Image: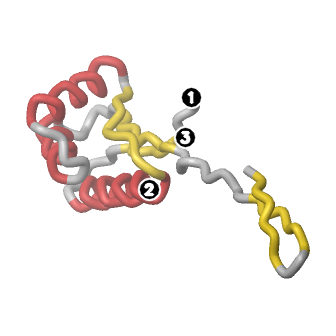
Amino acid sequence: MARQVKEGGQILTRTRKKLQAPGMWQVLLHNDDYTTQAFVVWLLKTVFRKPEPEAVAIMLAVHTSGLGVAGVYTRDVAETRAEKARRLAEREGFPLLCTVEEVHA
């Protein structure tokens, strides 16, 4: 958006840059044969702040289709939560794969 301003006898044109909303990223949980369903529900409630019914629904999606969306966030929040989930899974001895990918509109 351009705007003209008179300053010191001169007309100046000032341009404002239009700000864009930050891109959104989704955290994906991948199914495996070792990570327990109870741990996935706990992880969704703890790291991703999901209420119990939603955590169970996401866990079932991961279990039945092989993949589930734990949440959609700005990039740094998504990466931080995914890393926290990976660390907790590793600490408990689970090979849970947790990835982050950009959401395309």
Amino acid at circle 3: Glu
Q: Nearer the viewer, residue 103 or 45?
A: 103
Image quarter hosting the C terminus: top right
Q: Disc 1 and disc 2: Cα gap in Å?
A: 20 Å
Q: Mark on residue 79?
A: 2
Q: How packed is label 2: few (under 14 Cα within 10 Å), some, or many (20 or more)?
A: some
Q: Mark 1 or mark 2, which is nearer to you?
A: 1
Q: Residue at x 33, y 44 (%)?
A: 96
Q: Which residue is mark 3?
A: 102
Q: Quadrant of residue 58?
A: top left
Q: Quadrant of residue 83?
A: bottom left
Q: Residue at x 16, y 52 (%)?
A: 46
Q: Position of residue 48 (x, y in %)?
A: 25, 48
Q: Secondary structure at mark 2?
A: helix
Q: Position of residue 7 (x, y in %)?
A: 81, 76
Amino acid at circle 1: Ala
The image shows residue 23, relative to residue 30, as above or below, that is: below
Q: Disc 1 and disc 3: Cα gap in Å?
A: 10 Å
Q: Secondary structure at mark 1?
A: loop
Q: Of the two numbered discs 1 and 2 on the same chain, state the one appearing first in sequence.
A: 2
Does the CB distance between marks 2 and 3 fall below 8 Å?
A: no
The image shows residue 63, relative to residue 25, as above or below, that is: above
Say left or right for 27 vs 17: left
Q: Which residue is mark 1?
A: 105
Q: Residue at x 41, y 51 (%)?
A: 78
Q: Nearer the viewer, residue 104 or 81?
A: 104
